[in-house]
Amino acid sequence: MRVGSNLNISAKLLDLGLKGMAVLSAYDFTLNSIVVIKFTLVDLYTSSEQSKSMEVNGVVCYNNCSGEKQHRTGISFIKMSKFNQQLIFDFVNKGTVNE
Protein backbone atom coordinates (compact mmCIF):
# COMPACT_ATOMS: atom_id res chain seq x y z
CA MET A 1 0.00 0.00 0.00
CA ARG A 2 1.12 3.52 -0.58
CA VAL A 3 0.30 6.51 1.61
CA GLY A 4 0.98 9.91 0.10
CA SER A 5 3.40 10.07 -2.78
CA ASN A 6 6.19 7.82 -1.52
CA LEU A 7 5.49 5.99 1.77
CA ASN A 8 5.09 2.26 1.06
CA ILE A 9 3.41 0.11 3.72
CA SER A 10 3.24 -3.67 3.92
CA ALA A 11 -0.09 -5.03 5.19
CA LYS A 12 -1.94 -8.32 5.51
CA LEU A 13 -5.37 -8.47 3.88
CA LEU A 14 -7.92 -9.63 6.47
CA ASP A 15 -11.21 -9.14 4.66
CA LEU A 16 -12.26 -8.14 1.16
CA GLY A 17 -15.68 -6.93 0.09
CA LEU A 18 -17.25 -5.13 -2.82
CA LYS A 19 -16.94 -1.72 -1.15
CA GLY A 20 -13.63 -2.06 0.69
CA MET A 21 -11.21 -4.10 2.73
CA ALA A 22 -9.71 -4.58 6.18
CA VAL A 23 -5.95 -4.89 6.59
CA LEU A 24 -3.53 -5.51 9.45
CA SER A 25 -0.28 -3.56 9.57
CA ALA A 26 2.19 -1.92 11.91
CA TYR A 27 1.37 1.49 10.42
CA ASP A 28 -0.91 3.90 12.30
CA PHE A 29 -3.07 5.28 9.47
CA THR A 30 -4.74 8.67 9.77
CA LEU A 31 -8.53 8.64 9.37
CA ASN A 32 -9.73 9.94 5.99
CA SER A 33 -6.27 9.61 4.43
CA ILE A 34 -6.14 8.47 0.81
CA VAL A 35 -4.20 5.28 0.07
CA VAL A 36 -3.25 3.40 -3.08
CA ILE A 37 -3.55 -0.35 -2.65
CA LYS A 38 -1.84 -2.94 -4.84
CA PHE A 39 -2.89 -6.55 -4.34
CA THR A 40 -3.32 -9.82 -6.18
CA LEU A 41 -6.38 -12.05 -6.24
CA VAL A 42 -5.42 -15.73 -6.61
CA ASP A 43 -7.96 -18.19 -7.97
CA LEU A 44 -7.26 -21.50 -6.23
CA TYR A 45 -10.37 -23.26 -7.52
CA THR A 46 -9.39 -23.80 -11.13
CA SER A 47 -7.07 -26.50 -12.41
CA SER A 48 -4.64 -23.83 -13.64
CA GLU A 49 -3.97 -21.44 -10.77
CA GLN A 50 -4.65 -17.94 -12.08
CA SER A 51 -4.08 -14.56 -10.51
CA LYS A 52 -5.20 -11.01 -11.18
CA SER A 53 -3.23 -8.04 -9.89
CA MET A 54 -4.87 -4.69 -9.38
CA GLU A 55 -4.30 -1.23 -8.02
CA VAL A 56 -7.16 0.68 -6.40
CA ASN A 57 -7.61 3.89 -4.43
CA GLY A 58 -9.20 3.98 -1.03
CA VAL A 59 -9.90 6.15 1.99
CA VAL A 60 -9.17 5.07 5.58
CA CYS A 61 -12.50 4.85 7.43
CA TYR A 62 -11.32 3.29 10.70
CA ASN A 63 -8.04 2.40 12.39
CA ASN A 64 -7.97 0.39 15.61
CA CYS A 65 -4.86 -0.61 17.52
CA SER A 66 -5.11 -4.35 18.14
CA GLY A 67 -2.09 -4.70 20.41
CA GLU A 68 1.54 -5.58 19.74
CA LYS A 69 1.82 -2.42 17.59
CA GLN A 70 -0.63 -3.85 15.04
CA HIS A 71 -3.46 -1.82 13.56
CA ARG A 72 -6.63 -3.16 11.98
CA THR A 73 -7.55 -0.62 9.33
CA GLY A 74 -10.74 -0.35 7.28
CA ILE A 75 -10.45 1.09 3.80
CA SER A 76 -13.36 2.06 1.54
CA PHE A 77 -12.70 1.90 -2.19
CA ILE A 78 -13.04 5.11 -4.20
CA LYS A 79 -13.00 5.78 -7.94
CA MET A 80 -12.70 2.08 -8.84
CA SER A 81 -12.91 1.03 -12.47
CA LYS A 82 -15.79 -1.18 -13.59
CA PHE A 83 -13.22 -3.82 -14.56
CA ASN A 84 -11.76 -3.97 -11.03
CA GLN A 85 -15.27 -3.91 -9.51
CA GLN A 86 -16.13 -6.97 -11.59
CA LEU A 87 -12.90 -8.78 -10.63
CA ILE A 88 -13.62 -8.28 -6.93
CA PHE A 89 -17.28 -9.24 -7.38
CA ASP A 90 -16.28 -12.48 -9.13
CA PHE A 91 -13.65 -13.26 -6.48
CA VAL A 92 -15.92 -12.56 -3.49
CA ASN A 93 -18.82 -14.57 -4.96
CA LYS A 94 -16.78 -17.49 -6.29
CA GLY A 95 -18.07 -19.95 -3.69
CA THR A 96 -21.69 -18.76 -3.70
CA VAL A 97 -24.26 -21.52 -4.21
CA ASN A 98 -27.21 -20.47 -6.38
CA GLU A 99 -30.42 -22.24 -5.39
Image (tube, grey):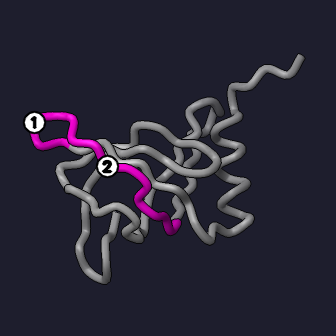
N-term mark: 2 or 1: 2
> Does 85 lie within the magenta span?
no
Circle 1: element type: loop
Left or right? Give the position of 57 relative to 30.
right
The residue that mark 1 highlights is: 68
Quarter containing the C terminus: top right
The amino acid marked with disc number 1 is Glu
Q: Where is residue 80 shown, x and y percent of the image?
A: 63, 67
The numbered mark at residue 3 is: none
C-alpha span from label 2 to label 1: 14 Å
Q: What are the residue bounds of the magenta stretch?
A: 56-70
Say which quarter of the image contains residue 10. bottom left
Q: Residue at x 26, y 80 (%)?
A: 6
Q: Where is residue 63 shown, x and y percent of the image?
A: 31, 49
Q: Residue at x 41, y 59 (%)?
A: 60
The residue that mark 2 highlights is: 63
Magenta region's main secondary structure?
strand
